[in-house]
Amino acid sequence: MTTGTVFLVGAGPGDPGLITVKGRDILGAADVIVYDRLAHPSLLQYAKPGAELVFVGKSSAHHAMLQPDINQVLVRKAQSGKMVARLKGGDPFVFGRGGEEAEYCKENNVPFVVVPGVTSAIAAPAYAGIPVTHRDAASSFAVITGHERDDRGEAGSREAGAAEGRRNWAHIAQAGDTLIFLMGVEALSEITTRLQQNGRPPTTPVALVQWGTWPAQKVVTGTLATIVGIASASGITPPAVCVVGDVVNLRIRLQWWDDRTSRPLFGKRILVTRAREQASGLADTLRLEGADPVVFPTIQIKPIADNAMLSTAVSNLRTYNWLVFTSVNAVEPFSKALAENKLDARALAGCKIAAIGPATADMLQRRLGIVADFVPSNAVAECLVKEWPQQDLTGCRVLLPRAAQARDLIPQELGRIGAIVDVVPAYQTVRPETDDAELRALLLAGKLNILTFTASSTVHNFVDAINLSEDVELQLAVTNIPLAAIGPVTASTLRDYGLSPSIVATTHTIPGLVEAIKEFYRTNRP
């Protein structure tokens, strides 16, 4: 059997957007992903179906798997012919023990590839508004481990072994204008004392950045003389990066990631109930605003097998005057039906095209290369029929490919002014099989700040998924959390269940929903 390859992939410091393109592509191709706790969980969405996921997370002095065992897992999986991605927080060769794993692969004749990642040593200070160099403050920096390995056992015990002798504090204290200590929280007292003993003034600025680049990021500042007490009082725990030097003072002017004035969603945990196929758009937008999206898909978009109705309609496009798309979800199956009938966008030459909103219009242009003739000012059915450009549709034939279950407002209203509307199911929405235990726990513990709903189907399926109508305690918990609806129809569905939305987007798009949530926090500073 051909031996597989081990890819040592840097996951970056936490923000999933900071993984490299090469790292993401390897995750999508790997047969096995061996990951640790500092790799953002959402990165696992890139795994191919059926990939084996192996958690080997480590925290301070606590290990799901010891390092020698991790080494053996990597080699054993590769020797069985599998492509193995070892997903490591930060960069695999910056205190990530990637060098040890590479050595073990080499000793066992297993090929390996190193995929560097963005290290928290630079990224965490950057997200705290602290550049590690600055022409007015620092022209050099050094990255130092906060502890050395214990030669008698697993690193993380904080008991010094023979390797501790490498720590020449006289050199470390003057190693750079900026000193960056990783994994140094538990040794903070020793670090600050040693630096002062070796020439750093007690007034030297210090910052601790906990969970840097994550929405949970917390930053405290002080000096070498005061930071130990400040850290203790603030409850700072690992993982945290310690920055020592004058660049820390720049945070006053450069704070951005955790600036709640300009980024009111920072640190907010927001539930995303969209279909998994679409959730990333909303989740990524929220993440860019500093929020922590929790994805719990309540709907799944599924194609309709052997869709003879859609195929027949597409083959007779020349008989239609209008083609109406009320969702981005209808574009792909329609495009597929065109291809199956050996047609392309030229078949639409005799039709005018209506798209219910800018997202659907954009999808039509990207997927089919066509520009919609009519897009209403708001992405709701009521607005589409009210602003329809023709008041008399007598004899006009309209094709409406849509979800298998949907409101009949559009065909009824267009029919009222003379149109002959053929409603053709293009896709179906179903409730996916999901484990609701974690979501229920978050709701009951009050650990979600906003619940978002982007369609009536997300409301129906959310209520069903957690059995909301039968659980009084859960009902109370949900009523205490602000609810955000993408538009008035979704808001009305929430009210049908006795749930009162606090936020209703005036622009019925994902950016409009996010902007409405931001405005809510600007005016209600909970």
Image: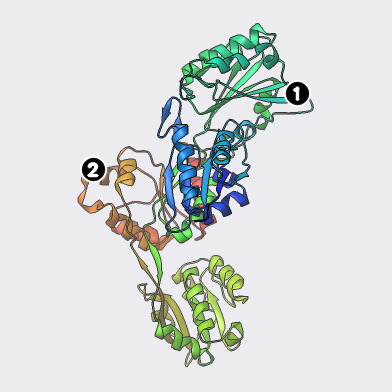
**Rendering coords of residue 180 (x, y %):** 64, 24
Front-most of residues 185 and 439: 185
64 versus 415 height, above or below = above
- Residue marked by disc 2: 473
**Rendering coords of residue 156 (x, y %):** 48, 23
The answer to whether one can see residue 152 in this image is yes
Q: Is residue 266 left or right of residue 414?
A: right
Front-most of residues 418 and 35: 35
337 versus 487 height, above or below = below
Picture quadrant where residue 350 is located: bottom right
Q: Nearer the viewer, mark 1 or mark 2?
A: 1
Is the residue marked by circle 2 packed among few (<14), some (14-19), or many (20+) residues within 10 Å? few
Q: Is residue 213 left or right of residue 431?
A: right
**Rendering coords of residue 418 (x, y %):** 44, 88
Front-most of residues 139 and 387: 139
Q: What is the secondary structure assignment of the residue under circle 2?
A: helix
Picture quadrant where residue 142 is located: top right
> At x 60% / y 22%, what residue is drawn?
207
> At x 32% / y 37%, what residue is drawn?
445
